[in-house]
Amino acid sequence: MDDDLVFKALADPTRRFLLDQLFERDGRTLTELESELEMTRFGVMKHLRILEDAGLVITRKAGRQKLHFLNPVPIRLIHDRWINKFAERQVSALADLKRELENDR
Amino acid sequence: MTTSTGTAATTQIYRVYIKATPQAIWDAITKPEWTARYGYTGLADYDLRPGGVYQVRATEEFKAASAAQGYGSPDLMVDGEVLEADPPRKLVTTFRMLLDPTIAAEPFTRITHEIKETGGGVCSLTLTHELDGAPLLANLVSGSLQSEGAGGGHAWILSDLKTLLETGKSFAE
């Protein structure tokens, strides 16, 4: 799977919102996802298609319904490929700092 | 229809594309010499026929590392039963995680591995985990507990498996 497709798919607030929705509750229909957005059905379908092409959403048939599932693996691969390499130390230092500050409150 | 929505919310699906043959991916999932090298590094033992036993044993290294962090590890990390084995394409097992007594008390869940050739020497590996009645295990395998040292769940395991098969080395090696 192409990293470019993943970065492009993530570079849009509506698509990130759709991923957040699926993270909260997985396996939703188009109708359910559409109800959370002020957008036409075709608009939502187009965004879902881009997420599917990037491997971030996987669809599965259940009876007459098509369910959408979040696939976090492409994001994990980017994390393991990029974040681990360049930023893990800084990220964990910041996470430690945040924890310390919040504990002090 | 009535159960589909209920089940959907408790099902997790993971897919990774790996440049390897279906047989290499199958071996990496089912053979202990491979499973000891990525993810939670357990020694998988599958009796690959319906009704066959499925177990994952902890390596000595894993037990020593767990002990060093202040909690022991049981010999068996996972137990389950093989429901369907169609090498090198499809493997269905039940699954129960035994490292934590609270999670071990949840009912058996179900994992399906599917391997498909997608062309150009690349395969897709899709892991479907049906987690009905097992919210604690669902939380663990989703990777939510990684910051607490519980590992990154299926996404982390599959990313490590891809790295191992494509580069010959896992993250830790």
Image: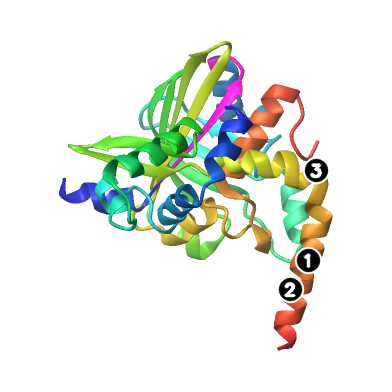
Indicate which disc, 1 or 3, sits on the residue closer to the N terminus: 3
Q: Main secondary structure of the magenta part?
A: strand
The picture places residue B27, in percent across and down from the top left corner, at 58, 22
Name the side, left or right, on which A34 lies relative to B111.
Answer: left
Tell me the kind of residue under disc 1.
Leu
Q: Which residue is mark 1?
A: A94
Q: Which residue is mark 2?
A: A98
Queried whether the magenta region covers residue A50, the answer comes back as no
Q: Which residue is mark 3?
A: A85
Q: Chain of mark 2?
A: A
Magenta range: B12-22
The picture places residue B5, in percent across and down from the top left corner, at 25, 51
Name the side, left or right, on which A27 lies relative to A89.
Answer: left
Tell me the kind of residue under disc 3.
Lys
Are discs 1 and 2 less than 8 Å apart at CB?
yes
Which residue is at a point 77% across and 54% down the rendered structure image?
Answer: B65
Quadrant the C terminus of chain A occupies: bottom right
Residue A42, image quadrant? top left
Indicate which disc, 3 or 2, sits on the residue closer to the N terminus: 3
Label 3: few (<14), some (14–19) or many (≥20) C-alpha neighbours in 10 Å: few
**Residue A35 shows in this picture:** yes
